[in-house]
Amino acid sequence: MLDDLLKRNINWSSTIHANQPGYFKRLSTHQSPEFFWIGCSDSRVPANVVAGLDPGEVFVHRNVANVVHSTDMNFLSALEFAVDALNIREVIVCGHYGCGGVKAACEDMPHGLADHWLEPIRRLAVTYEVALNQIRRPQMRLERLAELNVIDGVGRVASTPILKRAWRQSKDVSVHGLIYGLKDGLLRDLDCTVRAEHISNNGITA
């Protein structure tokens, strides 16, 4: 399987060289992405592919179920680098329907270390239990929970010292929430964008 992977790489590289001379030389000199993408590790949701972007146009951080943990140093380091070093001004938290992590968070069975990672989603399920139970179809409830996880992630990103510092420095950074449909390939805006003007001294305002 590894040999096949390496052959595919050679074919891909050869095709790029033939169709876009100078492509790799241009990419190797610098990166200037416009977006920082916080997404799910699911192999069906590659950021640049679903967004129709080329490599070099999106800086990516991915984890199981696109959970934003305020103590995740991997995420925080990537966010800080994106905002401070790459001067990215569009931060996107993107979940997807049919997320296995969201489903696992709602199951009454052990999932090892993933159970610790998915705790914020379980907390959301408890917080919004009444509203979620009004949705009759189990799959639709999971889809709504996936949306709530994205919205919560946007708020968590906006609450980091990294974003607060950027806004104090008058950097025009926006944090958006999107969700991707595996069945139709479309991204949907969850209308939960946070910008500097939404921040008050006590937190995020409407």
Image: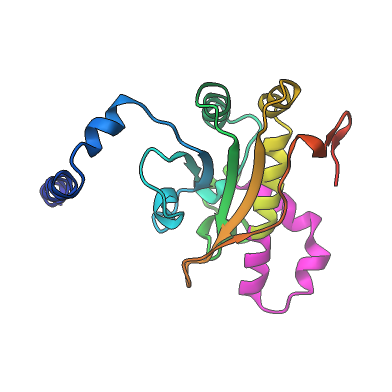
Is 127 magenta? The answer is yes
Asked whether 118 or 59 is in front, the reply is 59
Asked if one can make out residue 109 in the rendered structure from this viewpoint, the answer is no
Q: In which image quadrant can residue 154 be found?
A: top right
Asked if one can make out residue 184 in the rendered structure from this viewpoint, the answer is yes
At a point 66% along the width and 42% down the height, the residue shown is: 175
Scheme of image coloration: rainbow
Residue 132: image x %, image y %? 76, 67
Q: Is residue 152 above or below residue 195?
A: below
Q: Is residue 198 above or below residue 83?
A: below
Is 111 magenta? The answer is no
Q: Residue furthest bottom?
A: 136
Asked whether 166 or 62 is in front, the reply is 166
Q: How many marks?
A: 0
Residue 159: image x %, image y %? 74, 33
- Report the magenta stretch's main SS: helix
Q: Magenta segment range?
A: 118-146
Q: In which image quadrant can residue 166 be found?
A: top right
At a point 44% along the width and 57% down the height, the residue shown is: 50
Q: In which image quadrant can residue 147 be found?
A: bottom right
Residue 99: image x %, image y %? 53, 60
Image side of residue 65 versus residue 193, left or right:
left
Asked whether 126 or 98 is in front, the reply is 98
At a point 44% along the width and 49% down the height, the residue shown is: 47
Residue 135: image x %, image y %? 74, 75
